[in-house]
Image: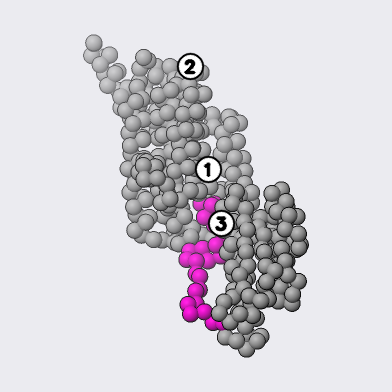
């Protein structure tokens, strides 16, 4: 190699801010001109937030129950009135057991309250309370638990009110007072939405960027880039920085929609939120670029990123399913899912605020995961054709 060729090759490996700026401008123009980028960055996040905010609801606002009155006494009618007077119960009253069972089989009611034929006789006994039977539809365990809980609460309140009207003390030996920390109203939207934001950032970070390098190889523009003096560092930064900015814009959009439209309270620091989001976005971008670099095919990259990033973010992050209730082997596997730490950080910031021990742990693990994925991407990126 001549001296001039050696000098030229040495110059080619030096980092250039000018080349990086040009590459970032090129990548930004590609994002703006690509309709799929706008779809994934704006339309899909708002659609997902709308679905998780209004379409998915784990709360029970109105339970459809059947009340079987096998006895038409005054006490039985008062108990029925207690059920029909509750804003949480939509009652169907009948004295025909087969009619109510048929309605439950047809999914028209979610449970049956049976007032037995000897209700008054059992209620008049001093040594016991009159039992009522609760039949629930076990095909939906969550709703069945609501039926059981509401029925038990209305039954106990009615017994206490009846005792007070008759001058009989019915104060229980143990007075249970339930208090929900961090989500006092027990609104499912308040813990679902932070998890939904993590899903959106996974879509923007991993799935969108998994198509970037693969698209370059399919269109032949990667060969053109490799023939220039662009270094590996410049190439990676040019792919990361524009999408980091795009992801930050999506995060701001999600926060505005979540707080001001969905009315989900935010209690943490915005600076910590920015740090957690940036680190997870860097992790997702590194994962997407790694997949794209290895596959060099948009279809394969999309399928792999869907299975490696999107599905674990839903199933193994604690967003929907409680990790502690999973089998031990599955619990161990969740530690390698970066979305677990992002979901934990977001739910902590939204529901509890600045809990240092939780947030610092999540921040450190997200730093480690971002270094791993970006490092692997840099290792697998080559400036030559195979």
Question: 10 Å neighbourhood of mark 1: few (<14), some, or many (≥20)?
Answer: many
Q: Is residue 2 visible?
A: yes
> For numbered disc 1, what is the local secondary structure?
helix
**Please, is residue 88 above or below residue 18 in the view?**
below
Which residue is pictured at 37% across the width and 15% down the height?
A: 385
For residue 16: magenta? Answer: no
Residue lying furthest top: 1
Q: Which residue is mark 3?
A: 188
Q: CA distance from mark 2 to mark 1?
A: 30 Å
Q: Which residue is labeled 2 in the image?
A: 220
Mark yes or no: residue 256 visible: no
In the figure, 28 relative to 13: above or below?
below
> Does 22 sit left or right of 52 as displayed?
left
Find residue 340 and report its horizontal and vertical position in percent: 42, 46
Q: CA distance from mark 2 to mark 3?
A: 48 Å
Q: Is residue 276 above or below residue 285?
A: below
Snapshot quadrant of residue 132: bottom right
Residue at label 1? Answer: 200
Is label 2 or label 3 in front?
3
Residue depicted at 57% across the width and 58% down the height:
145
Q: Earlier in the sequence, mark 3 or mark 1?
A: 3
Marks 2 and 3 close (CB-CB < 8 Å): no
Task: Choose between 50 and 121: the one closer to the eye.
Answer: 121
The numbered mark, 2 or 3, whose residue comes first in the sequence reads: 3
Q: Nearer the viewer, mark 3 or mark 1?
A: 3
């Amino acid at each position: 190699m001549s001296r001039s060729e050696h000098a030229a090759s040495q110059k080619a490996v030096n980092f250039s801010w000018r080349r990086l700026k040009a590459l970032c401008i090129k990548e930004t123009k590609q994002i703006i001109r690509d309709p799929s980028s706008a779809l994934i960055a704006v339309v899909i996040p708002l659609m997902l937030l709308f679905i998780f905010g209004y379409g998915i609801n784990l709360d029970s606002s109105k339970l459809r129950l059947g009340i079987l009155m096998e006895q038409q006494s005054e006490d039985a009618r008062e108990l029925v009135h207690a059920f029909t007077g509750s804003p949480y119960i939509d009652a169907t009253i009948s004295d025909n057991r087969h009619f109510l069972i048929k309605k439950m089989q047809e999914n028209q009611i979610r449970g049956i309250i049976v007032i037995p034929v000897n209700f008054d006789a059992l209620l008049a006994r001093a040594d016991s309370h009159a039992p009522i039977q609760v039949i629930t539809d076990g095909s939906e365990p969550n709703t069945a638990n609501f039926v059981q809980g509401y029925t038990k609460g209305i039954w106990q309140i009615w017994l206490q009110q009846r005792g007070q009207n008759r001058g009989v003390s019915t104060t229980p030996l143990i007075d249970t007072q339930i208090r929900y920390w961090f989500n006092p109203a027990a609104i499912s939207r308040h813990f679902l939405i932070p998890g939904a934001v993590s899903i959106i950032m996974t879509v923007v970070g991993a799935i969108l960027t998994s198509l970037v390098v693969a698209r370059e190889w399919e269109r032949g523009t990667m060969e053109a880039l490799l023939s220039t003096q662009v270094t590996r560092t410049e190439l990676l930064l040019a792919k990361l920085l524009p999408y980091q900015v795009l992801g930050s814009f999506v995060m701001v959009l999600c926060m505005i929609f979540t707080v001001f439209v969905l009315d989900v309270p935010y209690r943490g620091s915005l600076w910590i939120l920015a740090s957690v989001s940036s680190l997870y976005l860097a992790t997702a971008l590194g994962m997407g670029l790694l997949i794209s670099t290895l596959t060099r095919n948009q279809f394969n990259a999309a399928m792999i990123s869907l299975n490696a990033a999107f599905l674990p973010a839903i199933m193994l992050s604690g967003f929907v399913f409680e990790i502690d209730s999973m089998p031990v082997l599955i619990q161990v596997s969740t530690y390698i899912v970066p979305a677990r730490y992002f979901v934990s950080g977001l739910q902590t910031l939204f529901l509890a605020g600045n809990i240092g021990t939780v947030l610092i742990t999540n921040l450190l693990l997200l730093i480690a995961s971002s270094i791993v994925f970006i490092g692997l991407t840099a290792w697998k990126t080559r400036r030559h054709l195979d």
